[in-house]
Amino acid sequence: MLPQIIVASTCILITLYGVFRKNRVFFNLGYFVYGLIVVFSEINFYLQSQEVIHIATATLWLIQSSLALPNKLPYDGSKIAKSAGIKIYICLSIINLYGIFIVRASDIPDFVSYFHAILAILPVIAIYLILNNKIEITKS
């Protein structure tokens, strides 16, 4: 469990770095890797217990990883880019709010719920930055 905690903490730090630098690639990278950690962890739990909830949870975080797949497309500030960003970040927030619930309802150590709480709050900051035009616009 300790290696997972170290990697998960690193993912959160990468995401925080992305917020402070207003860098979408680092922001998404943290969510992408964190999602993969949860996917592999839940698959391992499923193999041990055969409980279907672990497959459902793994699928949800696979969706998170898919939504947060880092890319270097320039942010052009268009309505489409803003709309997509807001929808993606709302989904990331909802997924991690569910993560808090799942941690509290399972045998996973309670402090992991704080990881999910941080990851549920950070997209709200990203949405604020998008809505208030605080993200640097780049022309392709």
Image (cartoon, rainbow, N blue to C red):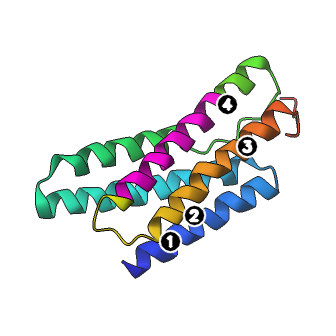
Q: Which of the two labelled residues, at mark 2 and mark 4, occupies the earlier sequence position?
A: 2
Q: Which residue is mark 4?
A: 86
- Viewer-proximal residue among 140 and 64: 64
Q: Which residue is mark 3?
A: 126
Q: Residues within 10 Å of mark 3 (few under 14, many from 20)?
A: many
SS for callout 1: helix
As measured in the structure, the alpha-carbon distance from the residue carrying label 1 to the one carrying label 2 is 6 Å
Q: On the image, which quarter does residue 49 sit in?
A: bottom left
Q: Which residue is mark 2?
A: 11
Q: Is residue 98 magenta?
A: yes
**Which numbered mark, 3 or 2, is in the foreground of this view?**
3
Q: Quadrant of the N terminus?
A: bottom left
Residue 68 visible? The answer is: no
Location of residue 27 in the rendering, given as x and y in whole percent from the top left corner: 67, 51
Q: Which residue is mark 1?
A: 7
Q: Quadrant of the C terminus?
A: top right
Find the magenta span and give its range: 86-103
Q: Amino acid at mark 1?
A: Val
Q: Residues within 10 Å of mark 1 (few under 14, many from 20)?
A: some
Q: Amino acid at mark 2?
A: Cys
Location of residue 115 in the rendering, given as x and y in whole percent from the top left corner: 53, 63
Q: Which of the two labelled residues, at mark 4 and mark 3, occupies the earlier sequence position?
A: 4
As measured in the structure, the alpha-carbon distance from the residue carrying label 4 to the one carrying label 3 is 8 Å
SS for callout 2: helix
Q: Is residue 93 magenta?
A: yes
Residue 4 visible? The answer is: yes
Q: Amino acid at mark 4?
A: Ile
Magenta span: helix, strand or loop, mainly?
Answer: helix
